């Protein structure tokens, strides 16, 4: 507790977030942000604390700030997309879709990114595309059989040859490597 170094304060903020009230964690994170306002990871941590405490609308601003400081950071894009979806505001869904797709172009194996994209697409009535996103998330998790079911269902509702249909076809055709 006597260590006032930045790494020690950061560690205490993370422990507070995991073990105590989120309001205490946000206070600790705000102290970090005051020390280094241009540190995107402190803004990300604040967004995560707010999101995990059930306040996704409040989490949007810190995630936006983190992303403004590191615009190509896939994880920041995925977290922001997650908060936009979790805010439960249909007006935010097109932005969530765009941001999640951008993050997934960089980190294509993010199960959370794919699941949040599936939710955003589904809420917009893009059911077949949501099924492809779900299938891709299941592939990233290693659940190949469930992924194939979602991909096959998506293919029935997609125009053959389109990028989404081809993604679904890749999943349906996938054969896991055989162990020796």
Image: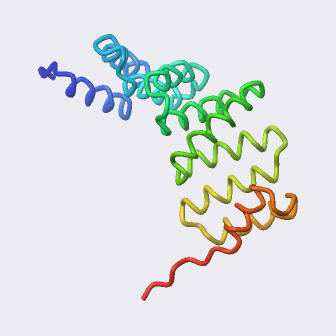
The quadrant in which the N terminus is found is top left
Rendered view: 22 above or below 163 = above
Q: Residue furthest front?
A: 161
Apparent side of residue 123 relative to residue 44 in the rendered image (left or right): right
Q: Residue furthest left?
A: 2
Residue 16 picture quarter: top left
Give the x, y percent position of residue 95: 69, 29
Q: Nearer the viewer, residue 180 or 28?
A: 180
Q: Nearer the viewer, residue 9 or 167?
A: 167
Q: Residue at x 44, y 27 (%)?
A: 70
Residue 45 sits in quarter: top left
Q: Is residue 74 left or right of residue 32?
A: right
Instruction: Point out the residue furthest to the top here.
Output: 34
Q: Position of residue 9 (x, y in %)?
A: 24, 23
Q: Is residue 18 left or right of residue 55?
A: left
* Residue drawn 80% across the image and 60% down it: 154
């Amino acid at each position: 507790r006597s260590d006032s170094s930045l790494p020690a304060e950061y560690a205490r903020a993370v422990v507070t977030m995991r073990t105590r009230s989120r309001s205490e964690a946000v206070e600790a994170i705000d102290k970090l942000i005051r020390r280094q306002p241009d540190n995107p990871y402190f803004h990300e941590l604040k967004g995560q604390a707010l999101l995990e405490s059930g306040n996704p609308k409040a989490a949007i601003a810190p995630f936006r700030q983190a992303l403004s400081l590191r615009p190509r950071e896939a994880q920041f894009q995925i977290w922001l997309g997650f908060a936009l979806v979790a805010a439960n505001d249909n007006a935010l869904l097109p932005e969530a879709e765009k941001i999640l797709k951008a993050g997934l172009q960089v980190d294509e194996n993010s199960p959370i990114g794919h699941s949040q994209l599936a939710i955003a697409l589904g809420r917009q009535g893009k059911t077949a595309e949501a099924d492809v996103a779900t299938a891709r998330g299941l592939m990233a998790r290693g659940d190949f059989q469930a992924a194939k079911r979602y991909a096959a269902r998506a293919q029935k509702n997609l125009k053959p040859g389109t990028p989404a249909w081809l993604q679904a076809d890749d999943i349906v055709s996938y054969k896991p490597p055989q162990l020796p």
